[in-house]
Structure formats: C-alpha cells, structure tokens
Image (cartoon, rainbow, N blue to C red):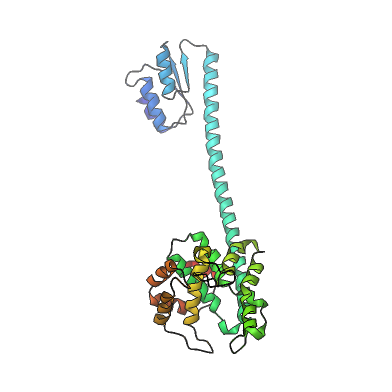
Amino acid sequence: RVAQDQVKKVTPDLVLSDMIMPEMDGIRLLEWMRQYDPEVPVIMVTAIHDISTALEAIRRGAYDYILKPFEKDQLFLGVGRALQHRRLIIENRNYQRNLEQLVEERTAQLTAKHVELEQSYDDTLEALGSALDLKDAETEGHCQRVTAFCISIARSMPVPDQYLPILARAAFLHDIGKMAIPDSILRKPGPLDDAEKKKMREHCEIGYNMLIRIPFLRDAAEIVLAHQEFFDGSGYPRGLKGEQIPLGARIFTIADSLDAMISDRPYRRALPMSHAREEINRCSGSQFDPAVVDVFMTIPEQHWLDLREHLGSPFRLAHLKNL
C-alpha cells in the first residue's frame, strides 16, 4: 500500500519489487502497475528460485526477474536496461505525438492549397461561362440555372459527393463548344436549315475536344460529349442508348429541358412549372431516363421556383455546395 501511495504522488522511472510482501505480493503489485502506468518498467527482485514464478512474473509484464543474492553490477545492468527501455518508450511516444501534429499541420496546409486550387479552377470556368453568355445572349444565365438544377437532382439520388463537382463543371460548360459555332447560326432569328443544324450539332464534340485536354475536366468532358443523347437512342452525336449514356448526361437532359421550358424565349413564352413537369414525365423512357424522372418528380415544384429566385444573386460554382 505504501508503494502504491508513493507511485500516485510521483510517477517513478522504475519500480523494484520483491515477490513476498505483507499485504500485496509482487504479482498483484505488478498487475496494478500495468494498469496504473504500463510505461514504468518493473523489475522483480526476489529469493524465490522457481522458474514457474519467474515466467508468471514476466507474463504479467515484469521487465526483468533478478534472483537474490545478486551482484551489484548485475542489478545496475538490469536497472540501466530498464531505464533505457523507458526512455525509448517516452521518446517514441513524443515522436509519434510530434509526427501526428506535423501530419495534421501538413494535411491542413494541403487542404487549404486544394481548396485554393479548386477555387482557381472554378474562377476559370466562370470566366468561360461569362464569355459564352456574351456570345449567345439568348440563353444568358442558362448555364448557371441548369448547373444548379443538375446538382439538385443529383443530391436526391445515390450519387457520391465526389461526383458532384464533375457534374457541376460539365453542366456549366455543356455548351462551351458553341464558341466555335458562327454567330450567323447562333443568333439566327428563324429556324435553322439542315446544313446549319448539322453545324450546330458539332458543338458537343467541339466542347469535348476542348475539355478533354484539361486534366481536371476530363471526366466532365464525357458528360459534355453526351449531353444531347436521348434515353431511347434518338439523340446525338453518337446515338447512345439507355445506360450507355453517362449518368451525368442523363441527369443533365432533364435539367436542361426544364430550364428551356420554364424560360422565356423570343419565339415563345415560358411554360408554367406544372406543365414543364408533366412534359418531362410524359417523355420518360424516350428522351429521359425513367429512373431519373422518378427522382425529379419527387422534388416539389416550389423547390425549383425558389432555386431560380436564389440564382438571381451573383453566381459562384462554390455556392452549389450549399444547395
């Protein structure tokens, strides 16, 4: 008991204990020390010349077992080894602690750099989107709205969080290929003839070829290439069908059609939201993926109206995380 009280007052670097004591034998003291502070080495110093007792002490955590009578040098050697063992344990613990702190600091630095890099990517994309709005003024704001619509639909599906930035960038840049389409076609007030339609359809592949060269946009490029594909295979440019079409593109076609129907155009007025939803539901299985349509139809009409109003403020891709 006296030994326990002393240990509680000041943690020792080393404990020397006999096996036979009045109130608590050496094994029980050893077990208590293992629970109280397992880093403190315990050397059993005893006159019990019994191998089974020695093995039991070692098994319970004794650092060494020295038999009486002993030479002074033998004791000093055992004590020296035990203290060296404790020192190594403490140094290793401190090293681990410092290493963990260093890793945390380095991780925080890398995370900050990653966020900064992601923001610089998005700044570049927003500049491209602004340039596209200037070229095709009729659909100004369309890229922002369809991007937000895509994310809203995707968040209602079992889509991994890491896929959302890919989808957002693809939706935002889906018409980037129109930068290469002549203004005479983009801004033509009347219907396009067959040759002009063919030229306009090239914007999917043009956009893909622009984005595929940029490492952080390669996954988005696949969605851009397929954003005019229809579920029944009647779309373009490759006539993909069903799940041959990337999921992001299947989500996009619904978001794109929704925005087109509920937005005013020079040649027609916007449809009411209820009519647009009915039309999307009607085209399930032909133009649209039925599974994605089912998800879309579970989202209340008011959500889309509120979202459009929210997008009236300055748009940033980073804000989509809060949708």
Q: Can residue 157 be seen in this view?
A: yes
Q: Is residue 288 left or right of residue 133?
A: left
Residue 148 in percent (x, y) is at 49, 72
Residue 114 in percent (x, y) is at 59, 59
Residue sitting nearer the eye, 172 or 30: 172
Q: Is residue 234 left or right of residue 155?
A: right
Taking the view exactly as shown, the residue that stands out farthest to the left is: 23
Residue sitting nearer the eye, 210 or 283: 283
Residue sitting nearer the eye, 151 or 35: 151
Q: Can residue 17 be seen in this view?
A: no
Residue sitting nearer the eye, 125 or 48: 125
Q: In this view, does 186 lie to the left or right of 66?
A: right
Residue 105 in percent (x, y) is at 57, 51
Q: In which quarter of the image is residue 226?
A: bottom right
Q: Where does the N terminus fall, quadrant-wise?
A: top left
Residue at horizontal 55 percent and vertical 35 percent from the top: 91
Residue 249 in percent (x, y) is at 53, 68
Q: Is residue 292 above or below residue 26?
A: below
